[in-house]
Amino acid sequence: MHKRFQKGQNPWLFIIGLIVILSMLFTIFSQKKQETLPVYTNSDKIQREDSKEDQEIKFDTVIYTDEEHHLSMEVPSDWQQITKDGFQTFVHSPSASSIQIQILPYDPVINMKTAEALSTETADSGKTFVNYKRLSNSSYELQYQDYQNSTYDYIEKVFWDQETIVKLVCTFNDANYSKILPYYEKIFETFAWKRSKEIPEGFIMYYEENTKCQVLFPESWAVAVAENVISATDEQSGATEALSLMQATKELSEITATELTPLLRQNKNNFILNQFDNQKEKIVATCTYVLNNVQYHEDVYLFSANGIYYFLTFDYENGMIEESIPETCADSFKIFS
C-alpha cells in the first residue's frame, strides 16, 4: 500500500532529507575505508628514486692516451676524434657535443683564479658565467653558457702543475643537458694525469704580479701582501714565511758569509749565522736569534734576478713547524721575467 502525501505536504522536503541522510552515511563509510589504505611515506619515494638511479646509462668507450704529457681518459667509442684549433677534440655530431683537451704552458696566474676573475673573463668573451668551484690546490671547474640560435653549455675542468696546464673543455646544447651529462661524468672519472712537478699537497701557490714571483705557502697560514713584501703567518705557532726584495749590489755567486751577515742581523739580539752555503743559483743560510727571551730559528734562501735580491725567510721557534716546510717552499719559488 503506497503512502500518499497529505494535502499541503511538500514531497521535495522528503527527497532532500533522504539525500542528506545518504550523504552522511557515505561520508562515514568513506572515512573508515580511508583509514585502512596504505600511507604514502618518504621511504616509498626514496625507494622509487633508487630504482631509477640503478638504471645507469652504459656505453662503450675507448682509452685515449697522450704519452708525451702522461695523461689518459676514456671517451665514448662513437665520438669522432679530430683536431680543432690545434687541440685533440672528440665530437658527437648527432647531439652537437664535444670535449677538447687543451695542453697549455704553465702560467702562474692560474693559481690566483677566483670566481670574480673568471666571471669577468667570461663576460669579456661574450659568454655568461654560471658557476666556479675550486677542486684542489691545482684544479678547478668552470661553467658558463653561450646564447646563439640556441643555448650552449660549457664545462671546463682545469688541472695544472708547475710546468703544464690541462683543460678539458666540454661543449653541448643545453637541451641535451640531462642526456649528455653522464657521458662527461664518465670521462671526468677516468681522467688520469701524472704531473711532472706537482704543487705539494697541503700547500698553496701564490703569485704576486708586481714582483713577478710565485711563492709556496702552507695552506693553513694567513697570507698578507705589502709593498715589496709577501708574508704568511701560522696563527698557532707564530711562525712566519716572508719574501722581501732589495736592490742587488753584486752577483749572487760573489756574496760571502761576512757580507750577508749584516743584512740578516738587522737589530736581532744574539744573532748567530750557523750555516752558509753559496750554491751560485741561490744562497742557503741558517741563523738563530733571541726575541722576548725566546730563541728563534731563521732559514734564509737568497735568489737574484734582474738586478734584484729576493730574500725568502722562515722564522720559527724550535720544533713548532715541520722541518721540511722551508725547503719545500723554497724548491717551488720562481721568478718570472
Image: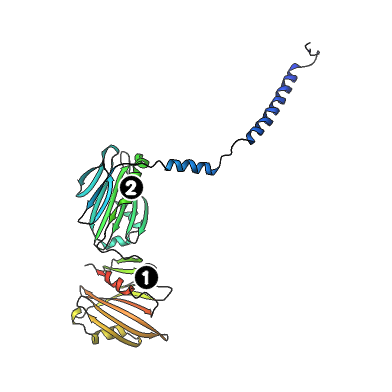
Q: Could you tell me if residue 232 is visible in this image? A: yes
Q: In which quarter of the image is the N terminus?
A: top right
Q: Is residue 291 above or below residue 160?
A: below
Q: How much space separates mark 2 and mark 1, taking CA atoms?
A: 40 Å
Q: Quadrant of the C terminus?
A: bottom left
Q: In this view, does 177 lie above or below 72?
A: above
Q: Residue at x 55, y 42 (%)?
A: 41
Q: Residue furthest bottom?
A: 270
Q: In this view, does 137 lie above or below 180?
A: below
* Quadrant in the picture for residue 254: bottom left
Q: How would you rate the neighbour count of disc 2 (Cα within 10 Å): few for under 14, some for 14-19, many for 20 or more?
A: some
Residue 285 drawn at (x, y percent): 28, 81
Q: Which residue lies furthest to the top in this view?
A: 1
Contact flag, marks 2 and 1 (Cβ < 8 Å): no
How many marks are shown on the rendered structure? 2
Instruction: Identify the element where label 1 is drawn.
Output: strand
- The amino acid pointed to by label 2 is Lys
Task: From the viewer's perspective, tell me whether residue 139 is left or right of residue 27.
Answer: left
- The amino acid pointed to by label 1 is Ala
Q: Residue at x 20, y 75 (%)?
A: 281
Of tags 2 and 1, the one toward the viewer is 2
Disc number placed over residue 281 in the picture, else none:
none
Task: From the viewer's perspective, tell me whether residue 272 is left or right of residue 40.
Answer: left
Residue 126 drawn at (x, y percent): 30, 48
Q: Could you tell me if residue 123 is visible in this image? A: no
Which circle's residue, 2 or 1, is located before the other in the chain?
2
Task: From the viewer's perspective, tell me whether residue 18 is left or right of residue 266.
Answer: right
Residue 322 drawn at (x, y percent): 36, 74
Disc number placed over residue 186 in the picture, else none:
2
The residue labelled by disc 1 is 224
Instruction: Identify the element where label 2 is drawn.
Output: helix
Residue 209 drawn at (x, y percent): 28, 66
